[in-house]
Amino acid sequence: VGDVWQGKATTAVYTGFDDVGVWNVGSVDEETTAPWWPVRDSIRTATIVDEISPKSTRFWFQHLEKLEVADISKIDFRENSTDPAHAENLCGAYHMFWHCDSLKLVKLSGAKNTCSNLSIDGMFGWCSSLEDIDFTGWSFDGVRSDGYVWAFAKCSNLKSIEGFSPNFDVIKNYRYMFYGCSSLSQDCSEWPV
């Protein structure tokens, strides 16, 4: 559709968006301000090439319904990744992949999350093709008290979540966290409940 980059056909290469944040225009299920929104129907793969520490990853890939593979292993979710105007989104992966219906693979290992206010609220909500998620190397000690709401909701083909150990000592609201995860068979014997 566009350029050739590192030997692969690309729709586009985006830079500079990690400092401004991405927001939805209307309701949670509507258009976002992501620079790739106008071409979202042609995006099959998304890769973060350079190590970045964005203000927030809120809504980044929301409604990229044809996205099949996302490599976010070079993102550093850390304390200075905040947007003071929207303090509720500190270190947020809020709705990052919301309604990515075709998403089959997300590369997370290598991504850092050293923040004390992480939110994965709705991060994979409605990713109905996703079968496995691997959070190996992530710490969930600093997840916000409401940071799990809708996290994996309606991931109907999700079978396992490796490296996921939610901190139930701080969680106050985890409603719909696994709603509609009809294929999930998760060993939670190590979870601190």
Image (cartoon, rainbow, N blue to C red):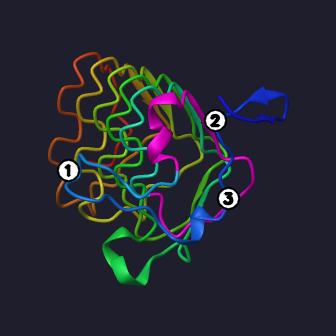
Marks 1 and 2, the one that precedes in the sequence = 2
Q: Which residue is mark 1?
A: 174
Of circles 1 and 3, the one toward us is 3
Q: Residue at x 17, y 57 (%)?
A: 173
- Within 10 Å of the Cα at label 1, are there few (<14), some (14-19), or many (20+) other Cα atoms? some
**What residue type is disc 1 on?**
Tyr
Q: Which quarter shows the N terminus?
A: top right
Of circles 1 and 2, the one toward us is 2
Magenta span includes 42: yes
Q: Quadrant of residue 71?
A: top right
Tell me if residue 110 comes above or below residue 8 in the rendering: below
Tell whether 57 sits left or right of 188: right
Tell me if residue 23 comes above or below residue 180 in the rendering: below
Position in image of residue 140 (x %, y %): 44, 55
Q: Which residues are magenta?
A: 36-57
Position in image of residue 33 (x %, y %): 41, 58
Looking at the rendered structure, which numbered label has been put on residue 15?
3
**What residue type is disc 2 on?**
Thr
